[in-house]
Image (cartoon, grey):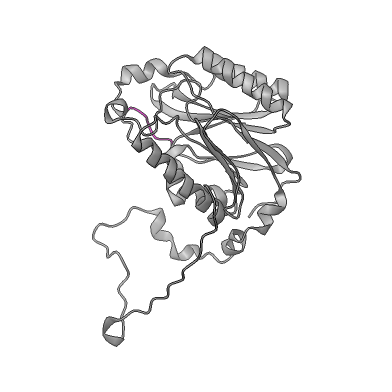
């Protein structure tokens, strides 16, 4: 499905608490962290969702999620704004690729939660969030973002709630991604925020294991790096220190997921690619013997101790 990268890639998940609407301050902080990452030989720095503009608060109250469009628009910036250009300049200067989030104001006037990955040499890739997580003033993106970076690493981006849907990560893998960048919004300290974090902690190792990808997750005070077998290799739980890890291409080949890709039967999955017929049965009708009994096998697997 994809060729292995030619060299290891050192990645970092970098925490950042954006000041809502203070783009200049937020940009200066991001640039300083990119320079720090360069001193630690990082090749890719991953910042949280909306870190340049603020304003996308996972776990926020219902009132916050209903923020008036004019307020959201006042926070927004284009993907070619001064803040993004300053990040791109820092990337070129240091050689550290970086992913940063913002509320994007598109030329059409629509608002998106977008994520820009700047590569050395001036190349940029923009992902627009596919799932808007209840924010009615944010439009939904309509495509997957998968691209090639240094040393043959193929990278995909899914923002926040994009990662909750299994189909999104599988599509990224089918498009050849070896590394999934998964930024999340800066979460308020609420029960809902804790629930969102807990969900990401359960979701991302599963996405990594199912699809044979590395995953880098970044959010304020939280973050993790997961290998293609679903094993946690670095984690941050509070504080503002970046976490980093060297991603070994050999781990991609060792993931059991790639063997199962060969066993897929796309002819059976056509229903996933079309609107479900509301009148169609949930399951295909089948005859059953023994008065309708269906054999069921259950396996109990002992979990190993892990914080994530």
Which x, y percent locates residue 226?
59, 47
Between 171 and 258, the one lying in front of the other is 258
Find the residue positioned furthest to the left: 279
- Who is closer to the viewer here, 263 or 14? 14
Above or below — where is 238 with respect to 259? above
Q: Quadrant of residue 139?
A: top left
**Residue depicted at 64% across the width and 43% down the height:** 154
67 up-or-down from 254: above or below: above
Does residue 263 belong to the magenta stretch? no
- For this orientation, the residue located farthest to the bottom is 290
Residue stretch in magenta: 137-141
Q: Residue at x 47, y 35 (%)?
A: 184
Identify the residue at horizontal 41%, vertical 27% (top origin): 56
Residue 219 at x, y = what percent? Answer: 50, 33
> Toward the viewer: 51 or 145?
51
Q: Is residue 217 visible?
A: no
Q: Is residue 67 left or right of residue 298?
A: left
């Amino acid at each position: 499905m994809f060729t292995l990268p030619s060299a290891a890639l050192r990645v970092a998940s970098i925490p950042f608490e954006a000041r809502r609407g203070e783009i200049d301050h937020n940009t200066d902080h991001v640039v300083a962290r990119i320079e720090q990452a360069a001193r630690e030989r990082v090749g890719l720095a991953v910042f949280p969702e909306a870190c340049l503009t603020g304003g996308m608060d996972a776990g926020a109250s219902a009132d916050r999620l209903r923020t008036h469009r004019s307020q959201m628009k006042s926070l927004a910036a284009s993907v070619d704004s001064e803040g993004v250009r300053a990040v791109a300049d820092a990337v070129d200067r240091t050689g550290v690729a970086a992913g940063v989030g913002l509320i994007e104001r598109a030329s059409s006037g629509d608002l998106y939660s977008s994520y820009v990955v700047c590569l050395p040499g001036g190349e940029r890739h923009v992902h627009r969030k596919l799932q808007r997580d209840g924010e009615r003033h944010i439009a939904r993106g309509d495509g997957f973002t998968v691209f090639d970076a240094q040393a043959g690493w193929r990278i995909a981006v899914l923002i926040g709630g994009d990662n909750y849907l299994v189909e999104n990560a599988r599509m990224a893998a089918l498009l050849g991604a070896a590394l999934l960048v998964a930024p999340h919004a800066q979460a308020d300290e609420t029960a809902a925020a804790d629930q969102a974090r807990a969900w990401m902690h359960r979701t991302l190792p599963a996405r990594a294991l199912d699809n044979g990808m590395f995953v880098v997750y970044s959010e304020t005070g939280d973050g993790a790096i997961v290998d293609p077998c679903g094993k946690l290799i670095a984690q941050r739980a509070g504080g503002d220190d970046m976490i980093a890890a060297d991603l070994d291409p050999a781990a991609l080949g060792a993931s059991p997921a790639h063997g199962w890709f060969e066993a897929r039967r796309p002819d059976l999955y056509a229903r996933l690619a079309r609107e479900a017929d509301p009148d169609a049965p949930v399951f295909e009708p089948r005859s059953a013997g023994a008065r309708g009994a269906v054999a069921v096998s259950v396996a109990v697997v002992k979990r190993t101790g892990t914080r994530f």
